[in-house]
Image: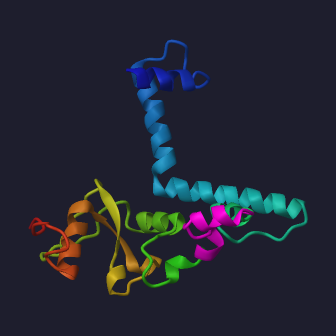
Amino acid sequence: MAKLETVRSLAWHRLPVNASLEQVFELALDLMIEKNHPSRRRERRERVAAYRNQKARENGQAESKTEPRQATMSARPKQANPKAESQDLRPRRSETRNRTTVTGVRYVEPAIRDRVQVRDQGQCTFKGSDGRRCGSTRALQIDHVRPVALGGDGTEENLRVLCAYHNRFEAERLLGAAYRGAGPPPV
């Protein structure tokens, strides 16, 4: 109940003073969908990029063709302290910008992940021996068709959406039974 009161107080300007639980839930669910739905994230990313490009044109700068997050992250100044830099083992964004095309890297850029989710209609794409698609919309994961361990990459063409069960099943099928303990898919 404390979370509901927190939502109610955070959304005081959107809800009536005596908002019902139904109204609070509806607002919370709308915000959850807006924030997490792949097509909505893509639309938001495109709006931000268009806004930044418009501002860049107004300031006489060249348009940015990168994703909004890439543009801001790559513009971040490097650390001046060499000791602190040596302790930070994470790669800089400028070093990883094209890493989804490099073989052996599991990271998938959010924009690519969202395009794959939209392309696969937010459903598991596993097809059983009878040709029927699983179609589950729960516990969805991005799967590499050709696993990174076998030379696959993080390109859109090599990615698909699978439910957690079928992702484990495919990992066992492709990488061996010792990889993960999952049973056969439902028929």
Which residue extends farthest right? 60
Left or right of 81 in this view: 87: left
For image coordinates 62% across by 76% down, the residue present is: 95
The quarter of the displayed image where residue 123 is located: bottom left
Q: Is residue 183 magenta?
A: no
Location of residue 106 in the rendering, given as x and y in whole percent from the top left corner: 42, 73
Q: Does residue 178 lie above or below 21 as drawn? A: below
Q: Which quadrant holds the N terminus? A: top left
Q: For the magenta stretch, what is the residue range?
A: 79-96
The quarter of the displayed image where residue 85 is located: bottom right
Which residue extends farthest bottom? 151
Q: Is residue 62 visible in this depiction of the protein?
A: yes
Q: Is residue 86 magenta?
A: yes
The quarter of the displayed image where residue 86 is located: bottom right
Q: Is residue 146 visible in this depiction of the protein?
A: no
Q: Does residue 110 lie above or below 44 as drawn? A: below
Location of residue 116 in the rendering, given as x and y in whole percent from the top left corner: 43, 68
Left or right of 71 in this view: 149: left
Location of residue 84 in the rendering, given as x and y in whole percent from the top left corner: 64, 61
